[in-house]
Image: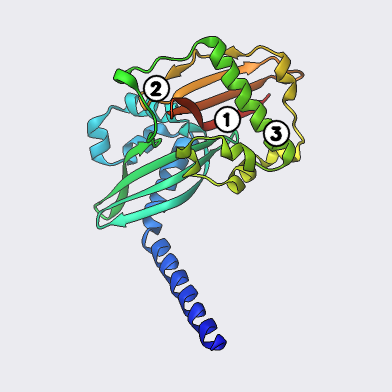
Amino acid sequence: MKKGCLIAIGAVVGAVALIVALVFALTGGVVKAADEFLALLGGGRMAEAYQSASPSLRAQQTQEVFEKTVKDLGLTDFASSSWNNREMNNDRGHVEGTVTTKSHGSIPLRIDLMKEAGDWKVYSLSAPKAGASVAGGTRAVPPEAELKTLALDTLLAFNKGVQAKSFAEFYKGISILWQKQITPEKMTEIFRSFIEQEIDISPIQAMTPTFEPSPSINSDGVLVVAGSYPTEPAKLKFTLKYVEENSAWKLVGINVNIK
């Protein structure tokens, strides 16, 4: 009886593995096209990326608007991707997951593609904004004092993750939206360089940050807070992105540099 159960379990596991392998094989072209497109952006070849996109995308926005959009999303700093959701239906497909930047930031992203003349072309990029709330289309940016507290709390929580060599606790405080795109283990991997260099940014508790450019809410309803702390010998620079969930600003992206 036990032997029969084991055989049955083995058959189920084998079937699941086969299904996963099949999904990966079928969506391989979609993933490859998305990654090649992002690689162009990360390599500074925005004009080439724009021209490689679907005619539908180019018909809806000029190259100037396209370049501003990908810059706002942080994709010009692209380093690698991790897609936890990939789908294809006839001539349409999409990938959804997390993009890691050269400066060790993390961006949740969805790319929609369509097959044209035998090739997959990007026709839509978006940082998923489910959970973001924009009242009347124009959500007010919080007061400066609140922004300073928000940035400090986020960076100190990030620092605790570095010191603990685990981002399990940090993960609990980020937005539900981002939690769907990343795991605590992936976060720890992304920020491994901070852990290995034993970086400690706790001295910022006694410092006042400078915001530059001014904090703003972009067209996706994302609050973008960027600036620096006057740490020595190198200045700590940061970009933090938040969406509103349950009347509170929750982190959906973070980029920290010390240089």
On the image, the x and y values in percent for residue 97 come to 45, 45
Q: Mark 1 — residue?
A: 255
Q: Quadrant of residue 191?
A: top right
Residue type at numbered disc 2: Asn
- In depth, the one of 38 and 47 nearer the eye is 38
Marks 1/3 in contact by CB < 8 Å: the verdict is no
Q: Could you tell whether 138 is left or right of 171 in the image?
A: left
Q: Is 134 located above or below residue 208 in the figure?
A: below
Q: Earlier in the sequence, mark 2 or mark 3?
A: 3
- In depth, the one of 80 and 194 nearer the eye is 194
Residue at left offset 37%, top offset 43%: 111
Circle 2 or circle 3, nearest the eye: 3
- In depth, the one of 12 and 109 nearer the eye is 12
Density class for disc 3 (Cα within 10 Å; few <14, some 14-19, many ≥20) is: some
Q: Earlier in the sequence, mark 1 or mark 3?
A: 3
Q: Could you tell whether 52 is left or right of 209 in the image?
A: left
